[in-house]
Amino acid sequence: MYSKEVMDHFMNPRNVGEIPDADGVGVEGNPTCGDVMKLFIKVEDDRIVDAKFQTFGCGAAIAVSSMITEMIKGKPLEEAEAISKEQVAKQLGGLPPQKMHCSNLGADALKKAIEDYRKKAKA
């Protein structure tokens, strides 16, 4: 049912936790299944230098959260912002159709974290 990549990121999630002085924080939830993801980013020179997450949800949601933090570290904001749910799912070796909504959590939380960073940067 799940790819080895999904199982690996679920059983050994990367970047779990929070960044207390995060430059941007994005929270995204799915009312249908109850999954909630909180993504923290640290930004230097318009590049994401660190990312962590806290996710309450199923194995797929945790795997997506772990994968997206790996995908965005070191990337310029514009490049990270362009990451789609399909790209996240592809990096995980695919997700079952009924779990594709989990890949939305990561992409949407990321966009909100970048938005939060930009708002704070303007202030």
Image: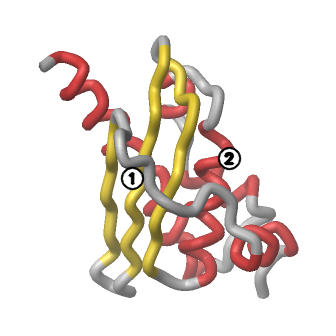
Q: Quick one: quadrant of the N terminus? A: bottom right
Kind of residue at disc 2:
Glu
Please provide percent x and percent y for residue 10.
70, 76
Kind of residue at disc 1:
Ala
Please provide percent x and percent y for residue 90.
73, 55
At mark 1, the secondary structure is helix
Q: Residues within 10 Å of mark 1 (few under 14, many from 20)?
A: many
Q: Which numbered tag is attached to residue 70? A: 2
C-alpha gap between disc 1 and disc 2:
14 Å
Residue 49, picture quadrant: top right
Q: Is residue 39 toward the left or the right of residue 51 in the image? A: left
Q: Of residues 115 and 44, which is closer to you in this image?
A: 44
Q: Is residue 16 above or below residue 71?
A: below
- Residue at the front extreme, as displayed: 20
- Residue at the left extreme, as displayed: 123
Q: Is residue 2 toward the left or the right of residue 39 in the image? A: right
Q: Of residues 91 and 41, which is closer to you in this image?
A: 41
**Residue at horizontal 75 percent and vertical 53 percent from the top:** 91
Q: Is residue 32 toward the left or the right of residue 83 in the image? A: left
Tell how many labels. 2
Is residue 113 something one can see in this rendering? Answer: no
Q: Are marks 1 and 2 in contact (CB under 8 Å)?
A: no
At mark 2, the secondary structure is helix
Q: Quick one: quadrant of the C terminus? A: top left
Is residue 96 something one can see in this rendering? Answer: yes
Q: Earlier in the sequence, mark 1 or mark 2?
A: 2
Q: Which residue is mark 1?
A: 109
Mark 1 or mark 2, which is nearer to you?
A: 2
